[in-house]
Image (tube, rainbow, N blue to C red):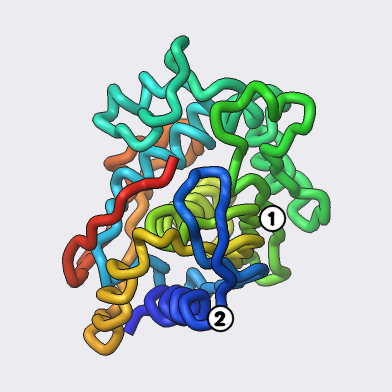
Amino acid sequence: MSCADIQYLNIVENILKQGTFGQNRTGMPAYKLPHQIMQFDLAREFPILTTKFVAFKTAIKEILWIWQKQSNDVRLLQEWNCHIWDEWMKEDGTIGKAYGYQLSKYHQVDTLLATLRENPQSRRMVVSMWNVEDLPEMALQPCAFLTMWDVSSDGRLNCMLVQRSGDMGLGIPFNMAQYAALTCMVAKVSDLRPGLFTHVINNAHIYENHVEPLKLQLDRREQALAAPHLLINPEIKNFYEFKPEDIILENYQHLGKISMKVSV
């Protein structure tokens, strides 16, 4: 069984059993638990759910849009036939000063890559998209907003993702897979090996209209499959040269789609 299924479904079950129920910004009530944590050793297996289908290619397009293109322009995603940000697109075609805009504004990705090359034992490798000054001009304030990076003495790259808010039904399966893949991509171009990926969710929640679909997924727990393998194009040496087709999941087997509606 995939470690991703084990850890993810444990959190889902705990939220349904112990979570508090209440209203939130979206108008769709939710059950929530604070401070949920998952941790994966990327040298052992790649964390993506098998108890339901996760649109891995779409997740990769989104993470490249944010981290590589450092874009806030939804139209670029649409050119890739990716429409997950359409609901938040403003009249100018962007999501305002959110996500990739903040990485570009302060050259944060370049700084991270340079530090990994020049001073890999630095304890200051922090990338943040939470800019208080610009928050009012964001269509959606960033959920997965902070990463902290560390290099082990044996040359393994470790990444901690901190997420202020996590939609367990739709968002978290995307985030866990795409940031694990990002860690592997950054390791590849930094001549490092993938290490630990730790995912911290401050407010892990299940929307009321996702309860039954997630119960269906919990019923599939004993049928969970083995994790697939992540393959990265070995010819790519520069982070800014990656294309979605350079990131491949080999032997990704799953138990089928489970439909859920996004709460905007």
Disc 1 residue type (three-letter): Trp
Residue 69 % position (x, y): 49, 27
Please rate how many residues cluster around mark 1, counting C-alpha atoms within 10 Å: few if below 14, some from 14 to 19, many from 20.
many
Q: Is residue 88 above or below residue 194?
A: above
Give residue 18's mark.
Answer: 2
Disc 2 residue type (three-letter): Gln
Residue 245 % position (x, y): 27, 41
**Going by the image, does 2 lie left or right of 223?**
right
Image quadrant for the C terminus?
Answer: top left
Residue 238 % position (x, y): 50, 36
| Residue 13 visible in the picture | yes
Residue 239 % position (x, y): 50, 38
**Residue at horizontal 69 percent and vertical 55 percent from the top:** 149
Q: Helix, strand or loop at disc 1?
A: strand
Of the two numbered discs 2 and 1 on the same chain, state the one appearing first in sequence.
Answer: 2
Towards the viewer: 133 or 20: 20
**Residue at horizontal 41 percent and vertical 41 percent from the top:** 236
